[in-house]
Amino acid sequence: MHHRSSWALPVFLGFILVIALIVYIPTYIRSKKNSVNLDVPVGVIERHMVNFFRNAFTGRLRISVDGVLVQNKIEWVVWRLEKRYDVLVGESERHLVTFVKTRKKLAPGFRKQAVTAYVDGVLAGTG
């Protein structure tokens, strides 16, 4: 009768965990560098700050106006090379803020995705 060792499964699971950490940690560190955090001031009399944040590791995208979240989504698979996000800002002084995110064709998850911001169609910033 052949008896299996009780240590084989824990050693195997430990090995898998070490390999996962070896891949996960450098990917996470690189993604911090590739994340986008762009602030766009809007308005002349009625001032607002619009923030676009995209985490390259998780694909989370957040757009906030004056610290209040107005768009929050996770995008892992996007087939288009360019994606637009529109936000209307202001009460008495209305402005359309448009963020255009452009992804690379090759390995987009591992490369920084350029973001361009426009206020009422005029270039307002890049990130």
Image: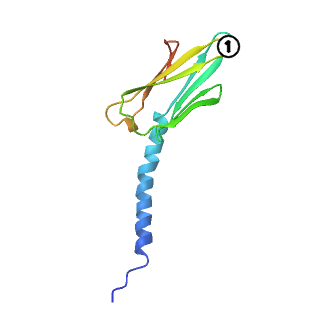
| Residue 92, image quadrant | top right
- Give the residue type at disc 1: Glu
Quadrant of the snapshot with the N terminus: bottom left
User: What residue is shown at x 51% (from left), y 36% (from top)?
Assistant: 73
In the rendering, at what x and y percent does residue 22 appear? 42, 53
Mark 1 Cα-neighbour bin, 10 Å: few <14, some 14–19, many ≥20: few
* Total residue callouts: 1
Q: Residue at x 43, y 40 (%)?
A: 76
Task: Please state which of residues 20 and 48 is positioned toward the viewer in this rendering.
Answer: 48
Q: Is residue 115 above or below residue 95?
A: below
Q: Residue furthest left?
A: 106
Residue at image coords 53%, 31%: 53
Kindly give the residue lying farthest to the bottom in the view shown. Answer: 1
**Percent position of residue 89, x then y:** 60, 19
Q: Specify the color scheme.
A: rainbow
Q: Position of residue 2 (x, y in %)?
A: 33, 86
The one nearer the camera, 34 or 65, is 65
Q: Residue at x 38, y 29 (%)?
A: 103
The residue to which callout 1 is attached is 46
Find residue 49 and report its horizontal and vertical position in percent.
62, 21
Determine whether the residue tagged by mark 1 lies in a helix, strand or loop: loop
Q: Is residue 27 above or below residue 22?
A: above
Q: Is residue 68 left or right of residue 25?
A: right
91 relative to 81 in the view: left or right:
right
